[in-house]
Amino acid sequence: MASYFFEREARTANSECYTVLDDEGTVGRVDIHYAGTVIHATLNVAESLTTESIQDLIDTMDEELIDAVGVTRQEII
């Protein structure tokens, strides 16, 4: 399993965007928009990531980005 980390590009009152990195460099970007108790997230990843790697990345996003704002996974669109 790759180790993913996030570098914030921008933050507003209602959104954030991050570059997604692993040990080898940039692998994607995630835009997160907060709409009350619902979060909309758009994840763009490199073509080389496998389905399993993408799921690992989503799990890491849940742990490091989404949990930090106190919203459950069921509230993410």
Image: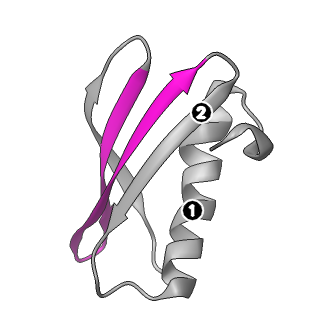
**Magenta span has 23?**
yes
In the structure shown, which secondary structural element does the residue marked by tag 1 occupy? helix
Mark 2 crowdedness (10 Å alpha carbons): few <14, some 14-19, many ≥20: many
Looking at the rendered structure, the kind of residue marked 1 is Ile
Q: Tell me, what colour scheme is on the image?
A: one colour
Considering only order in the chain, which callout, 2 or 1, is on the residue closer to the N terminus?
Answer: 2
Which SS does the magenta portion mostly show? Answer: strand
**To which quarter of the image does residue 3 belong?**
bottom left
In the image: residue 23, left or right of residue 26: right
Looking at the rendered structure, the kind of residue marked 2 is Ile
**To which quarter of the image does residue 21 belong?**
bottom left
Residue drawn where x is 32% and y is 37% of the image: 17
Residue 70 in percent (x, y) is at 72, 27
Q: Which residue bears the numbered disc 2?
A: 39
Query: Which stretch did the figure color magenta?
Result: 15-35
Q: Which residue bears the numbered disc 1?
A: 58
Circle nearer the viewer, 1 or 2: 2
| Cα distance between the residues tagged 1 and 2 | 14 Å
Residue drawn where x is 43% and y is 65% of the image: 4
